[in-house]
Amino acid sequence: MRRTLARHTWGPAFLVPFLMAVMTSPDAGIRAESRASHESDGEIPEVTPGAPFTPFERAALKLWSRDIEMYRKFTWDPPEMQDEAAEFMRAVQLQFLPRPRGRDPRITSAMGEKLFEKGCRDPLVRSYYVLALLQEGALRSEAFITQVLKGFDEICYPEEARWVALYSALAVKSSVLFPSNPGNLSGDLVRVVTRRLCDPTLEPLMVRVVFFELRVVLGNSSAPENRTQVEPIYKGCMAVKEKMDPWLQHMITAQYLIDEGWWMRGNRFAQYVSPAAWPIFHEKLVKAKGELLEALKLHPDWVEPAELMIGVAMTGETGDSADEWFEKAVALDPDSLHAYSSYLWALRPRWGGSVEEMYQLAIRAADYRKYDSRVPAFFLTAIEDVEEELHLAQNEVIYEDHPVWRMPGVYERACEILDGMIKHPSRQGEIVLYPTYEVLMTRKFCVACRAGRLQEARQIADQLGGKLSEPVLFTWYQQPARLIAEMYALTGKGAEKIKAARQMLEGVTPPYPNDVLEKAKQLFEEAYAADDHPQSRAYCTVWIRELEGLLAFNAGEWCPLRFDPGFTRWLIIGGVWTYEDENTAVVRANPSYPRTVIRPRASFPWPLEVEFDIQTHEHNHGVFLGLAVPRELNEEFAPTNDDRLGVALPDEIWVTVGKKPICLPSPLFRLNHLKVQLADGYAALWVNGTLMVEVRDPNFRPGPKFDVGALPQLFERSEKGWARLRNVRVRKFEPPKPGEVARAQDIGQAP
């Protein structure tokens, strides 16, 4: 059955390695207990009570100790600094293990910064600092990677010493490696990868370690958009594979074949796949299966071939059962989070599974109850995916309701897991198994919010003194500041008045009657007076000002759409938005979603005119900046046929209304003032006070919402990848009658 359904499904997400989380997760940790200089072969001291190193982890630390030995041999750092540097490097290595451990990611990064303050300029130490920043999720600039790589030219380190810096650069898909054409991958990287994979001194378990390293840094290598970046690595490996350990030969070849198959097929729904791609996809996966079976024969007790076979079997191309390969994988390694992750994807309805089967896998993970493993916490991941599938079935990509988390017993089971992890001996010492206490408690806070247990969420926040883990919050919520303010408001002394005001507003269809707006405003003012908590008062203030704006809108005046630090009355659709002042917000790219736009939560009836100032760095040539009215979703759950009116640097006007795209040359400023007028059968775009495009189409109907920002996304991983939105306001609009000349009233002029 799944083989048939697989041809009507999409995406290679089963190949997104959970291992990338080891590098970028806020759960990754810090610093070693004993100085690495005192560790000789086979003498890796235990550092975490209740979680002794596995044989694999010991092999990894032994292999990575070679970096510390190279540092001591080649560095120019003074002897009194070397012990501290070696300790820092070991701390980063502990965070790179499959079960990372330490004190806190920020402490590790601070250890590196302290070394630099003392004068350390060693490129290998600085490479480890780059990796520490990745583990913390704090790496923002590529300039530092460039400096690190250049530093190796000044000290005569062996070429293999560059592996941490180059792997880190690859992990962020840095332009250091892909300066202008991503197909021109750095030859240094290919040489270092192949040298590492062909190292004849690797002990048996170290062979698994180097495969683990490569899987981590390749990330979602099967995504077609990553082909130009990772294919040269595979080709380099194929050219020297006879020099590799036989198991590694089979595993690298299998991974390459799997990725080749997905590159040909693409990650779209099956009905959009070219008929010519299916035979190639089938051929590649059948060959990959053969390689994985050979690898399993060589080492029947190593789990990696079975993990990859779950995804191969899921496609239906090889006649295998994903169920059976999952059972094989967890029999070999009950702690294999990769097996759970791959199998969860295989159980999605698009691959012939069901949300019921996904939920049962969540229960199975929770029942494992081994709290020095990450498997029990996979329950939380699976519940999130079940909710996603339920909403996708309703064609909802953006949603804020969480019915599964509110089902009886779900919240309680999550708390049982998180409490079990918190109390486990591995999290009681100085160097703890990750996730840390702060991270686990923040997850508990997020789960409580998902389940609507706001009083319990408040108790957790107060218990932590408000010091919730920001990376965890942003993983669970697009707008955590809004969530926290709302949580305090709805659990404070004015909560009942706030709930009554919101219920009153939700009970009417816009335009909101003035009496409803006045009464809601009064209730928020009373709630403000009743509760002196700053978060609650800030929440009420935002609402009061918006209600004042809506009253102005009803009177035919401009309604300003103001910003606040939590973007309380905005829905962030995509991008990372930051508050500058009440009139200004800045957005940067978020690679997880291609639209860097924001949407007012208030509803305004059409006809409507919207005006705003928008600016971006000139580096973002060709990126649409303006307003979009999203229409229906296509079968891939992406906005389609949306109406767009805006500009693109350096000198273009873009308008797409219905199916009539218009592109006009026009000189633009760095900061441009846009005014969009929309009504049934009418659309107009004014730029810097001049009417640029006017469209009259009796079939045109604007949608119920509008987004403002940049489409598609801004350039990632660049200090230039930003856009600034200012002075957004809306007003009722009377469209010109046929034959009348459009007028721009009260319109500003950008400098």
Image (spheres, grey):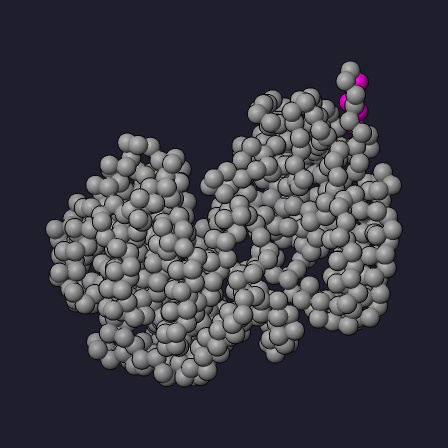
Residue placed most toward the observer, 615 or 155: 615
Question: Number of callouts in the render?
Answer: 0
Q: Is residue 743 magenta?
A: yes
501 above or below 556? Answer: below
- Which region is colored magenta? 740-744
On the image, the x and y values in percent for residue 126 come to: 39, 61
Identify the residue shown where x is 64% and y is 41%.
Answer: 707
Q: Residue at x 42, y 82 (%)?
A: 424
Q: Residue at x 79, y 21 (%)?
A: 737
Instruction: Look at the image and tell me in which quarter the C terminus lies.
Output: top right
Q: Position of residue 145 (x, y in %)?
A: 41, 53
9 lies left or right of 450:
left
Q: Residue furthest front?
A: 1
Residue 432 in view of the camera? yes
Tell which of 743 and 352 is nearer to you: 352
Prevalent SS, magenta region? loop
The image position of residue 217, as x and y in percent, is 34, 55
Asked whether residue 65 is in view, the answer is no
Q: Please determine whether, in this image, residue 235 is positioned above or below residue 88.
A: above
Which of the 4 quarters of the picture holds residue 667? Answer: top right
194 sits left or right of 92 in the view: left
Q: Say which quarter of the image contains residue 360.
A: bottom left
